[in-house]
Image (cartoon, coloured by chain):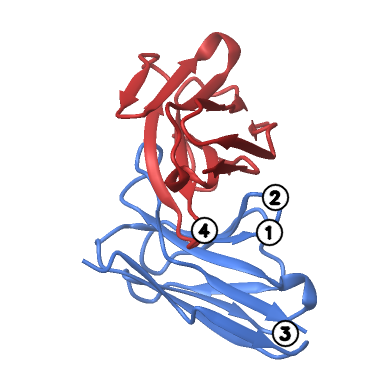
Chain colours: A red, B blue
Amino acid sequence: AQKVTQAQTEISVVEKEDVTLDCVYETRDTTYYLFWYKQPPSGELVFLIRRNSFDEQNEISGRYSWNFQKSTSSFNFTITASQVVDSAVYFCALNLYSSASKIIFGSGTRLSIRP
Amino acid sequence: NAGVTQTPKFRVLKTGQSMTLLCAQDMNHEYMYWYRQDPGMGLRLIHYSVGEGTTAKGEVPDGYNVSRLKKQNFLLGLESAAPSQTSVYFCASSLSLGDSPLHFGNGTRLTVT
């Protein structure tokens, strides 16, 4: 069975602190894709990043970085020097190549950045 | 470029009433999806479509019906609303399976009393 676990329901940090959002996934498929989406207080869902199962290279985009480790089935998201605008709910998702119905979302982590 | 547009944004129904949520995308995407979002449960797939004229059940299809008569539109219907269907509904589309990200609409907040 496929599953995505975001164990951190809520995180609150002070602005400029670094914060890591955890994502652990389960699948027996060898080809899959991992995604992070952001849902700010306005409610829309925005795509942040995609990783495929064959590419474990970490990625950095400005203050955002993602660490993909197949050995621990994790795809963690780190925000460096957090800002109030980073306050949002963040969802990790697992897409299996095989089926449109196999897009599994984690339950989300609500991140609050205090000024 | 509008992307994915959902209407309406808000709706209040009484138990037993029916309604249709409309989703329109202008990106020529083949795949379209309806999700519901409930607190602490992430997004759950209701129905999806892999192309014009096709629909399929997702994780939580009971109480909903869908239609995709045109490639750009995906309609979600509630025939007899129940309080358990109070939720935020998101439509999404994607270019292909697997590696394509989902493009979401802004959501519809539905309350059933």
Same chain assignment for discs 2 and 1: yes
Please report, as a chain letter, where disc 3 is located.
B
Across and down, in percent, residue A96 comes to 49, 34
Q: Answer whether labels 2 and 1 touch (C-beta < 8 Å).
A: yes
Evaluate whether label 2 is on the same chain as label 3.
yes
The answer to whether B31 appears left or right of B13 in the picture is: left
Q: Amino acid at mark 3?
A: Ser
Pointer 1 chain: B
| Residue drawn at the location 56% of the way across and 20% of the way down | A74
Q: Which residue is mark 2?
A: B41
Q: Quadrant of the N terminus of chain B?
A: bottom left
Compute the Cα span from label 1 to label 3. 20 Å
**Mark positioned earlier in the residue sequence (2 or 3):** 2
Mark 4: which secondary structure? loop
Identify the mark at residue A41; answer none if there is no mark: 4
Q: Is residue B18 left or right of residue A67?
A: right
Amino acid type, mark 4? Pro
Front position among marks 3 and 4: 4
Q: Which residue is mark 1?
A: B38
Residue B84 position (above or below residue A34): below
Q: CA distance from mark 2 to mark 1?
A: 5 Å
Amino acid carrying mark 2 in the image? Met
Horizontal and vertical percent for residue A106?
62, 40
- Asked if the residue under mark 4 is in contact with the one under mark 1, i.e. CB atoms within 8 Å, the reply is no
Q: Which residue is mark 3?
A: B80
> In 3D space, how far apart are the residues under numbered discs 2 and 4 (Cα atoms)?
17 Å
Tell me where residue B85 appears, x and y as whole percent: 72, 72
